[in-house]
Image (cartoon, grey):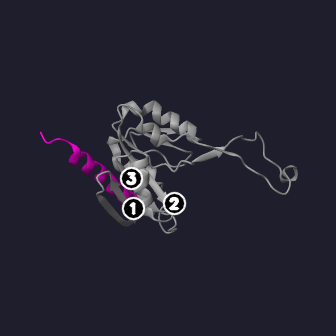
Amino acid sequence: MKVSNGVSISSSYGRLLTTADDGPTALPPPAGVELVEVLTAREMHDAVLQRLGAHGIVIMAAAVADYAPLTVAGTKIKKESAGESLTLELKKNPDILLAIAAASPRPFTVAFAAETDNVEQHAREKLQRKNADLIVANDVSDRSIGFDSDQNEVVIIARDASVIRLARGPKLVIANGIRDGVLATLLAASPVA
């Protein structure tokens, strides 16, 4: 069984993390974490916004689909009745990161970017477009890391353009590095007493 980034991050944050929104999973949530199971991007959007005020930091590690079917068949579509081709009409899912960015007060927000090319450039653009504080990017075209792997390798980019590179390693090690990057960024932004 492969470990997801979300479960690794949840484990890494331990008592700091109180809520995790996730799709169906056989993995148990870490101790002390409320798991809110969702099936659709709309359900995740609603669950995140409903709980947003209770959290000062939001880490959006889920790979939420950008689009969903416009209509959902109540039963299996048989190939005999569909013919030689089938066209699916899609609608745009709600943008959870943009909804968080519009919140007031807005929590410290960590976005993720699963990219296949120009990883850092696309991540920097997404960081600005989504008004996040940090973005964690990885190259999903490298099949040896990320999805379906217990290993990952990421780059963390902050709004001030600083970069932290986390070399290939187990997902829990990467999650700990992300946690440390979040905390370092928060500490650097805090006024010294």
Residue 77, percent from left and from top: 80, 47
Disc 2 on helix, strand or loop?
Answer: loop
Q: Which mark is residue 154?
A: 1
Q: Residues within 10 Å of mark 2 (few under 14, many from 20)?
A: some
Front disc: 3 or 2:
3
Residue 144 spot, x, y in % from top left: 49, 69
* Of pointers 1 and 3, the one earlier in the residue sequence: 3
Examine the rendered structure and indicate whether residue 164 appears above or below residue 108. below
Point out residue 132 in the picture as x, y percentages from the top left corner: 38, 46
Q: Which residues fall within the magenta stretch?
A: 170-193
Q: Position of residue 75 (x, y in %)?
A: 78, 42
Distance from disc 3 to disc 2, alpha carbons, whole Å, reads 18 Å
User: Which residue is disc 3 drawn over?
Assistant: 135
Which amino acid does the dot numbered 1 rest on? Val
- Amino acid type assigned to the residue bearing label 3 in the image: Ile
Q: Are marks 3 and 2 in contact (CB under 8 Å)?
A: no
Q: Is residue 191 left or right of residue 35?
A: left
Neighbour tally class for label 3: few under 14, some 14-19, many 20 plus, Cα within 10 Å = many
- Mark 1 in CB contact with mark 2 (< 8 angstroms): no
Query: How far apart are the two marked residues, 1 and 2, measured between alpha carbons?
Result: 13 Å
Q: Which-is-in-front pick, marks 1 and 3?
A: 3
Label disc, if present, on residue 39 of the rendered structure = none
Residue tagged by mark 2? 147
Q: Is residue 177 magenta?
A: yes
Mark 1 and mark 3: Cα distance apart in space: 10 Å
Relative to 83, 163 lies left or right: left
What kind of residue is marked 2? Phe
Q: On screen, 58 above or below 63?
A: above
Return the disc, 1 or 2, that comes first in the chain's sequence: 2
Marks 1/3 in contact by CB < 8 Å: the verdict is: no
Which of 189/168 is in front?
Answer: 189
Q: Quadrant of the C terminus?
A: top left
